[in-house]
Image (cartoon, rainbow, N blue to C red):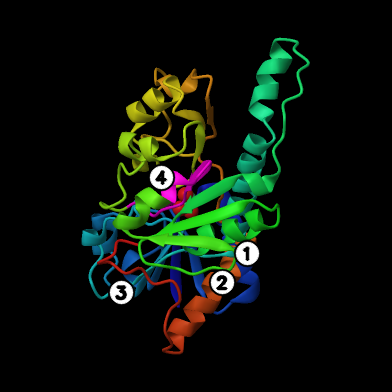
């Protein structure tokens, strides 16, 4: 069996090591040392350009090296090739850590204290109990549910919004466009963990911000294009929103003149919330490959009509 890894170069060696050790029967190749492209049967990639796939007529499965697959041009991937998302504990843990940190930093006023320290101000702010704050998660997929489970341990009130209704213990669930407004009305902190599709592009906009309680905060760990940047700036400047924590922007990297860099109420990280970890991802991908070899159903196959 021949696999080509064409993704994140710094992590390639760890992937290759895992396969050499645990699956010596597999010919695991790392881009650009791909050998003959027409021999490749499985492709692990962040992006799969049309010309590349055309040069690899034997490819049976495309494994996305990341959780999101919005960067994959479905039309370039022949219909008989399933596209598989990366769902692995390393990505999940990373996201849970990042979002917990962001929510707790907001809850415990850390950003206010950064400013207070710069001004040499000793001023203790009142801390409401976690149970007095409602955190809402948009997107109740694997990542959204893991985040909600962890946030529950701190005692926050929790809400989730999803395309179709998903029940979760201890979480007030909302679904679909008609329940978006009632969902938003209660969220003191809103977390975007949606997949990027034509239906969710620009969903974090003026209208949505207007439905949140005044002074709510936004955490975007989905994709940059979920957010309408100018609407966020307006909402922050008018006080409608208190803060935004953004791990994703459009484009990435953010242009040097973009107002997010200097806005005092925007906290920015360079798309680091969560990353595929070869140590935990490689065993899962190998098991999925073995399933495919045995003729079993692959796990994590993308529904092309839904877009994720
Ligand atoms: C990162 O954003 C990913 O999709 O894995």
Residue position marked by numbered label 1 in the rendering: 280
Seen at 65% across and 57% down, the residue is 152
Q: Name the front one of labels 1 and 4.
A: 4
Q: Secondary structure at mark 4?
A: loop
Find numbered disc 3 in the image and state the secondary structure of the residue it sits on.
loop
Q: Does the CB distance between marks 4 and 3 fall below 8 Å?
A: no
The label nearer to you, 2 versus 4, is 4
- Quick one: label 3, few (<14), some, or many (20+) residues within 10 Å? some
Q: Is residue 140 above or below residue 224?
A: below
The residue positioned 61% from the left and 44% from the top of the image is: 133
Q: Which residue is mark 2?
A: 284
Q: Is mark 4 within 8 Å of ligand 1?
A: yes
Calculate the distance from the C-alpha at mark 4 to the C-alpha at mark 3.
Answer: 32 Å
Q: Would you say residue 19 is visible in this rendering?
A: no
Q: Are marks 2 and 1 in contact (CB under 8 Å)?
A: yes
Q: Residue 27 location in percent, x, y?
A: 50, 72
Q: Which residues are magenta?
A: 183-196
Observer-side mark, 3 or 2, equals 2
* Residue 308 location (% of width, % of height): 35, 62
What residue sits 50% from the left and 68% below the top? 28
- Whether the residues at callouts 2 and 4 have beta carbons within 8 Å, the answer is no
Please give the count of numbered marks on the rendered protein.
Answer: 4
């Amino acid at each position: 069996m021949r696999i080509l890894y064409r993704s994140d170069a710094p992590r390639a060696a760890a992937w290759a090591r895992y396969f050499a050790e645990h699956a010596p029967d597999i010919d695991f190749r790392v881009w650009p040392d791909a050998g003959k492209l027409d021999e490749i049967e499985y492709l692990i990639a962040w992006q799969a350009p049309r010309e590349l796939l055309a040069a690899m007529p034997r490819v049976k499965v495309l494994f996305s090296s990341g959780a999101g697959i919005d960067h994959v041009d479905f039309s370039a991937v022949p219909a008989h090739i399933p596209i598989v998302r990366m769902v692995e504990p390393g990505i999940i843990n990373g996201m849970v850590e990042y979002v917990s940190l962001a929510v707790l930093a907001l809850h415990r006023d850390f950003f206010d204290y950064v400013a207070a320290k710069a001004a040499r101000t000793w001023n203790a702010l009142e801390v409401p109990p976690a149970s007095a704050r409602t955190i809402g998660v948009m997107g109740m997929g694997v990542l959204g549910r893991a985040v909600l489970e962890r946030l529950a341990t701190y005692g926050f009130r929790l809400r989730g919004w999803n395309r179709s209704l998903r029940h979760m213990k201890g979480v007030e669930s909302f679904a679909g466009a008609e329940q978006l407004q009632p969902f938003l009305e209660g969220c003191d902190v809103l977390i975007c963990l949606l997949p990027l599709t034509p239906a969710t592009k620009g969903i974090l906009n003026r209208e949505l911000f207007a439905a949140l309680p005044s002074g709510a905060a936004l955490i975007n760990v989905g994709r940059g294009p979920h957010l309408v940047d100018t609407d966020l700036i307006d909402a922050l400047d008018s006080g409608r929103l208190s803060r935004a924590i953004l791990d994703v922007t459009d484009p990435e990297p953010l242009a040097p003149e973009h107002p997010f860099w200097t806005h005092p109420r925007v906290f920015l990280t360079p798309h680091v919330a969560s990353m595929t970890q070869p140590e935990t991802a490689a065993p899962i991908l190998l098991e999925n490959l073995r399933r495919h070899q045995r003729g079993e159903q692959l796990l994590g196959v993308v529904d092309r009509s839904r877009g994720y």
